[in-house]
Image (cartoon, coloured by chain):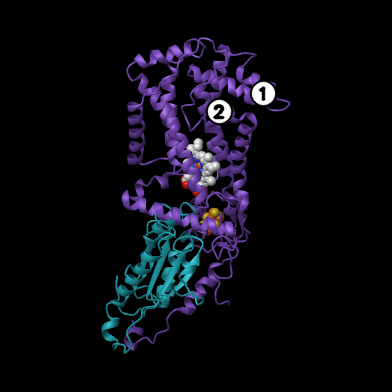
């Protein structure tokens, strides 16, 4: 038996990282973890927002849905009436509260997503078997931008028409399909009532698509943490309502002539709209360059570092009794129970089967199994137990004690 | 759950009693590769032998029980800070299993004097070492672990 069975497995991600990027990620993780532990000391770990990194955007998303439904009761999607309907809403009791909380929830959503993305990246939770959550997450980020930008197109003020005109300009710069894309934004050759309806359609479609991608995002995650604690939820709602009360959402000046390209308008929101500042100051090429850089870069990020995988869990067929404990405990839904013929019991039974691309090599399933029926392929448990026996302190037991 | 008769009947050892500790450590928690020497023992506390696991969720309570049965004086189980398992749920399951609330260790108990669970993050080498120190101090107040049964007089079946 080798003296160090654990040493034999060199999982390159944790043991002596040689790769400089790997070393960077590792020390970055350590810094992040130190910060989180400090937060734990301030509020308890049960209220640590970092531990609810995925639940936070989910929670804010529900706030957006709720306030958005409130807005739908009053909003009129036409050129002339969109602005007026929001003016009317401000006179309704709580009207401006609903509108403002929708707007600031949207900001909170983007902040929460960036916090989430930052955390899964910096703590090295973004690669390998987590590729599906990461890639669908990038789509979620894109969809959030689509929802936000189309939302600002709905207001019916100077900025709305500015955004529409600029989007048209940006799409027209795309080779071959540019004119087609631009006409899709406008829903016709020019800004009409249909354009506003089209913006509303994109706004709602992207919200629905967020649901769809969220489902894919969480497909591989068993029991995702999706609910924030009451404390965190109350804090988020409180801050949003407070900001909404202090700086109620408003519109810029209405525009009588939407076909006329506004010379200059205020961007106002630097979370969703910096691309439009880039568009007006540096042109469509810079805009598309920035878009490709952000989303392409995010898509590429997990491929910068690959692990050599050789420690996937595997089931010892003859030992597995089909109790399902491993399949319940696996955090990444990597284990499925399949029907099989049990030769010993002479009857049909269940057998655990590991789906390797999902397996994180964590070994949690090994801790679940009372029958030693599942093993990490390069780290079998038996040699570990042998080592524990071999290295145990050998003491001369006194005669009295030995008789016990 | 203690061992009442052994220490009082044994003749007091001449050298001070150094408890032998088995540490079952998640690699993602404390930066263990910086704390151990080539002999897999903690540099600051060579009586602590370290076995590394990819996640504390892989540590079976039965392994800790085996270690106690084989005569280790104490077992340390070390995982990431609660709430922050790299594999999302490993340390939650480990904690529940060791506390006897989750299968496959449901309703079983082990000597709680000799098993300690520590949840420490990658940035906390210092607190970890001091906790190891106080665990060893605590073990020194106990008699050496001489038993080879399950504490109820039955030989453990394996
Ligand atoms: C609408 C926005 C988003 C929502 C509501 C959301 C929600 C969630 C939730 C609830 C989880 C499960 C967390 C857990 O239980 O540990 C999760 C995991 C994850 N998310 Fe997101 N997410 C969003 C956007 C993103 C983005 C933009 C990225 C990165 C580009 C991303 C990357 C990930 C990754 C890699 C995981 C897996 C983490 C792990 O396995 O520990 N997500 N997300
Ligand atoms: S826990 Fe063990 S016995 Fe039960 S299904 Fe999984 S591999 Fe089979
Ligand atoms: S090691 Fe086991 S518990 Fe962990 S992901 Fe793989 S199959 Fe699931």
Disc 2 Cβ-to-ligand 1 distance below 8 Å:
no
Tell me the tag on residue A172. 1
Residue at (40%, 75%) from the top-left corner?
B45
Work out whether disc 2 and disc 1 sit on a shared chain.
yes
Assess disc 1: are there few (<14), some (14-19) or many (≥20) residues with their C-alpha within 10 Å of its C-alpha.
some
Chain containing the residue with disc 2: A
Along the viewing direction, whichever of B79 and B102 lies nearer the viewer: B79
**Mark 2 or 1 closer to N-term?**
1
Vertical comparison of B5 with A276: above or below: below
Q: Which chain is painted in cyan?
A: B
Q: Secondary structure at mark 1?
A: helix
Vertical comparison of A66 with A318: above or below: above
Q: Which chain is painted in purple?
A: A
Q: Which quadrant: the N terminus of chain A?
A: bottom right
Q: Position of residue A210 (x, y in %)?
A: 53, 32
Give the residue pinned by disc 2. Answer: A276
Q: Position of residue A380 (x, y in %)?
A: 56, 67
Along the viewing direction, whichever of B150 and A86 lies nearer the viewer: A86
Q: For residue A87, what is the image quadrant? A: top left
Q: Which quadrant: the C terminus of chain A?
A: bottom left
Q: Is residue A279 left or right of residue A36?
A: right
Q: Is residue A18 left or right of residue A70?
A: right
Vertical comparison of B148 with A238: above or below: below
């Amino acid at each position: 038996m080798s003296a160090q069975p654990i040493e034999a497995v060199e999982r390159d991600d944790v043991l002596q990282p040689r790769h400089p990027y790997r070393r960077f990620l590792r020390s970055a993780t350590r810094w992040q973890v130190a910060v989180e532990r400090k937060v734990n000391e301030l509020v308890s770990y049960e209220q640590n927002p970092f531990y609810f990194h995925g639940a936070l955007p989910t929670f804010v998303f529900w706030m957006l849905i709720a306030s958005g439904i409130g807005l739908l009761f009053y909003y009129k999607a036409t050129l002339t009436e969109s602005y007026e309907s929001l003016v009317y809403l401000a006179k309704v009791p709580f009207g401006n509260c609903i509108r403002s909380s929708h707007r600031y929830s949207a900001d909170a959503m983007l902040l929460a997503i960036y916090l989430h993305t930052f955390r899964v990246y910096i703590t090295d939770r973004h690669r390998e078997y987590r590729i599906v959550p990461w890639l669908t997450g990038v789509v979620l980020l894109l969809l959030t931008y689509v929802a936000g930008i189309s939302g600002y197109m709905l207001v019916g003020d100077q900025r709305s028409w500015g955004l529409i005109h600029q989007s048209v300009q940006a799409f027209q710069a795309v080779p071959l399909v540019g004119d087609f894309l631009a006409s899709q934004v406008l829903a016709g050759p020019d800004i009409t009532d249909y354009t506003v309806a089209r913006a509303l359609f994109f706004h709602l479609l992207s919200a629905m698509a967020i649901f769809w991608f969220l489902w894919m995002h969480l497909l591989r995650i068993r029991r995702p943490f999706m609910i924030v604690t009451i404390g965190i939820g109350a804090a988020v709602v409180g801050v949003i309502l407070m900001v909404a009360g202090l700086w109620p959402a408003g519109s810029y000046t209405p525009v009588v002539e939407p076909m006329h390209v506004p010379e200059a308008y205020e961007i106002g929101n630097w979370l969703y709209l910096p691309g439009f500042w880039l568009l007006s100051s540096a042109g469509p090429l810079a805009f598309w360059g920035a878009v490709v850089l952000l989303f392409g870069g995010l898509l590429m990020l997990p491929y910068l570092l690959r692990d050599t995988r050789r420690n996937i869990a595997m089931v010892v067929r003859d030992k597995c009794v089909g109790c399902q404990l491993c399949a319940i405990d696996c955090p990444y839904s990597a284990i499925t129970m399949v029907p099989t013929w049990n030769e010993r019991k002479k009857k049909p039974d269940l057998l655990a089967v590991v789906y390797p691309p999902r397996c994180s090599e964590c070994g949690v399933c090994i801790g679940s199994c009372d029958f030693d029926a599942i093993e990490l392929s390069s780290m079998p448990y038996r040699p570990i137990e042998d080592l524990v026996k071999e290295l145990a302190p050998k003491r001369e037991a006194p005669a009295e004690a030995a008789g016990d | 759950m203690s061992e009442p008769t052994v220490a009082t009947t044994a003749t007091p050892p001449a050298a001070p009693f150094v408890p032998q500790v088995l540490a079952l450590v998640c690699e993602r928690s404390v930066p263990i590769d910086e704390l151990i020497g080539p002999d897999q023992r903690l540099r600051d506390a060579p009586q602590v032998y370290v076995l590394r696991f990819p996640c504390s969720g892989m540590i079976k309570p039965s392994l800790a029980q085996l270690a106690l049965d084989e005569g280790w004086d104490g077992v340390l189980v070390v995982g990431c800070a609660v709430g922050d398992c790299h594999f999302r749920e490993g340390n939650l399951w480990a904690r529940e299993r060791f506390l006897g609330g989750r299968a496959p260790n449901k309703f079983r108990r082990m000597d709680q004097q000799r098993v300690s669970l520590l949840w420490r993050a990658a940035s906390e080498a210092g607190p970890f070492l001091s906790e190891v120190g106080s665990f060893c101090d605590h073990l020194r107040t106990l008699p050496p672990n001489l038993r080879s049964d399950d504490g109820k007089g039955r030989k453990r079946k394996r």
